[in-house]
Image (tube, grey):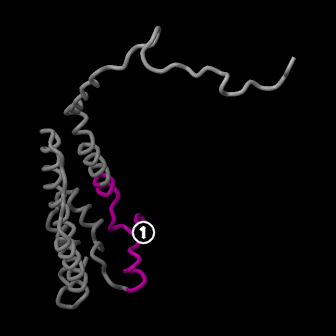
Amino acid sequence: MDASPTPAAAVPAPASGPGPGRPSPPVFPPAPVPPVPASRVRRLATPVGVMAVVVGTFGYVGAVDPNQPGHYPLCPLLRFTGLYCPGCGGLRSAHAVAHGDIAAALGSNALAVVGYAVFAVLWTVWTVRAARGRPMSIAAKPAVWWGIGAVLLIFSVVRNLPIGSVLAP
């Protein structure tokens, strides 16, 4: 008796292709299944979720007054340099908007109020497009982003000058 292993050539390889007990491959592959369109509820879930976060945030800022010291952290730029950044006064502005006082909101940070309005328009367009099953994409050219940066920079510089004191919070 020989205990040596059997050579690989002596072991029969499994047969491939049709035969007894094996189905033959299809002549034509199955047609691709078209994607099932998402339901309206599923399409609206993200815009509604974003609005829930925004409403919750505005509700918190409306309930906890940023005009009272100690509730929110200080702006680091204002604390260390004494200069107003483009966001300084944004919480006070959001607090005023939450209470329906648009004049006070504009006085705290006019650019933030413009940002709230732009967000509202974009969110509405997003929600309508989602309800209709259309994708939403914002493909802004680099010039638009540079323009937004320029507006923020100019707003920051002007609100820190004596002539722009009306823009300071």
For label 1, the residue is 73
Residue bounds of the magenta highlight: 58-81
Residue at left offset 47%, top offset 9% = 21
The quarter in which the N terminus is drawn is: top right
Residue 134 sits above or below residue 113 on the image: above
Residue 129 sits above or below residue 118 on the image: above
Q: Quadrant of residue 37?
A: top left
Residue 124 sits above or below residue 11 on the image: below
The residue lying furthest to the right in this view is 1
> x, y (%) of residue 99?
21, 57
Q: Nearer the viewer, residue 92 or 80?
A: 80
Residue at left offset 25%, top offset 62% = 94
The residue lying furthest to the bottom in this view is 162
Q: Nearer the viewer, residue 84 or 37?
A: 37
Q: Nearer the viewer, residue 30 or 99?
A: 30
The quarter in which the C terminus is drawn is: bottom left
> x, y (%) of residue 15?
51, 19
Residue at left offset 23%, top offset 56% = 98
Residue at left offset 19%, top offset 77% = 151
Residue 100 is covered by the magenta coloring: no
Left or right of residue 10: residue 17: left
Q: Nearer the viewer, residue 158 or 48?
A: 48
Q: Quadrant of residue 70?
A: bottom left
Residue 140 sits above or below residue 62 on the image: below
> x, y (%) of residue 2?
85, 21
Q: Amino acid at mark 1?
A: Pro
Left or right of residue 22: residue 99: left
